[in-house]
Image (cartoon, grey):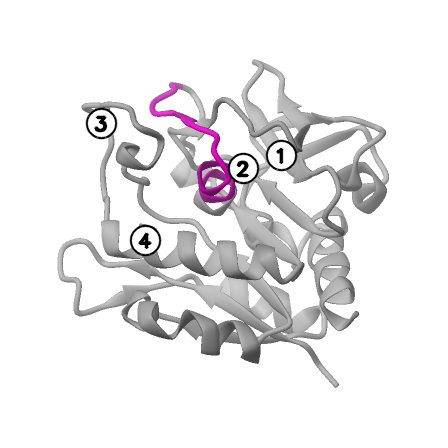
Amino acid sequence: MKPIILVTTNVDTTDQKYNRISRDYCTSIISSGGIPIIVDYALINDIDRLDNLADGLLLTGGGDIHSRYFNEPLHEKANLIVEERDDFEIGLFLKAFERNMPILGICRGSQLINIALGGNLIQHIDGHDYFDKRFEHVHSVDIKNDSLLYDIIGEQKLLVNSVHHQCVGRTPSDFHISAYSEDGVVEAIEHKSKRFVLGVQWHPEILSEKYLQHKKLFDRFIKECCN
């Protein structure tokens, strides 16, 4: 049977009656053999039921996460914050984590994984928001060869896109940093002992149809969800 993957959704901050999600997340899951189910933060009281339905969790990109979750003042350039989404996704992640469910975090999703387990964020960096070039490679990342990410990609360097102005800062003690950008920004984190809890800062879902290296992330994620 195909695994069921919960997919979180971004929120239209100009009118919270609407969700916004790139179809690339869903098509990447489908292409690798999974069934995506989009979940809204209004389901915060049904996290246990959602968790029991699913085989995997994909935490998607979107607006910034409020700094209250890591006990720091909010940066003046923080934007597009929806705290209800933050609360829901942290709760959903922790329940999936407790169950040893495979979890993939993309961009904001990687940052959320880090925060949920006690890390923090660098709330603003320059030179990494290439929204207009999101369909292109804009820089490379260096992947540690003793990491899950290296096992998936099979290369120590990977060309990626980049659409973010925040990044992972301090990581919890039970996490590896498995990739950095050329200028030292954390580009991937993974849990040391869980079988698949991986966060990447770039957007592989945008690139996976064109570039095999990025599709490998979804192929491995869905394979783990089948187990």
Dot 3 alpha-carbon crowd within 10 angstroms: few under 14, some 14 to 19, many 20 or more = few
Q: Nearer the viewer, residue 184 or 88?
A: 88
> Sequence order check: which comes first, mark 4 or mark 1?
4
SS of the residue under disc 3: loop
- In front: label 2 or label 4: 4
Residue 148, position as x, y percentages in the image: 78, 41
Q: Is residue 151 above or below residue 27?
A: above
Q: CA distance from mark 4 to mark 1?
A: 23 Å
Measure the alpha-carbon separation of dots 3 and 2.
Answer: 21 Å
Q: Residue at horizontal 59%, vertical 43%?
A: 199
Q: Residues within 10 Å of mark 4 (few under 14, many from 20)?
A: some
Q: Secondary structure at mark 4?
A: helix
Look at mark 4 in the image and give the residue it sits on: 87
Circle 2: is it few (<14), some (14-19), or many (20+) Cα within 10 Å?
many
Separation of residues labelled 2 and 1 (CA atoms): 6 Å
Q: Of 86 and 172, which appears nearest the observer?
A: 172
Quadrant location, the N terminus: bottom right
Q: Which residues are magenta?
A: 111-126
* Amino acid at the residue labelled 1: Ala
Can you identify the residue that label 1 sits on?
A: 188
Disc with the residue nearer the chain's start (2 vs 1): 1
Q: Earlier in the sequence, mark 3 or mark 2?
A: 3
Residue 180, x across and y down, in percent: 63, 23
Q: Which residue is mark 2?
A: 201
In three-dimensional space, the C-alpha distance between marks 2 and 4, rounded to whole angstroms, equals 21 Å
Q: Viewed as shown, does residue 215 lie left or right of 132?
A: right
- The mark total stands at 4
Marks 3/1: CA–CA distance: 24 Å
**Is the Cβ of the residue at disc 2 closer than 8 Å to that at disc 4?**
no
Around disc 1, counting alpha carbons within 10 Å, would you say few (fewer than 14), some (14 to 19), or many (20 or more)? many
Q: Amino acid at mark 3?
A: Leu
User: Which residue does the numbered mark 3 point to in the structure image?
Assistant: 74
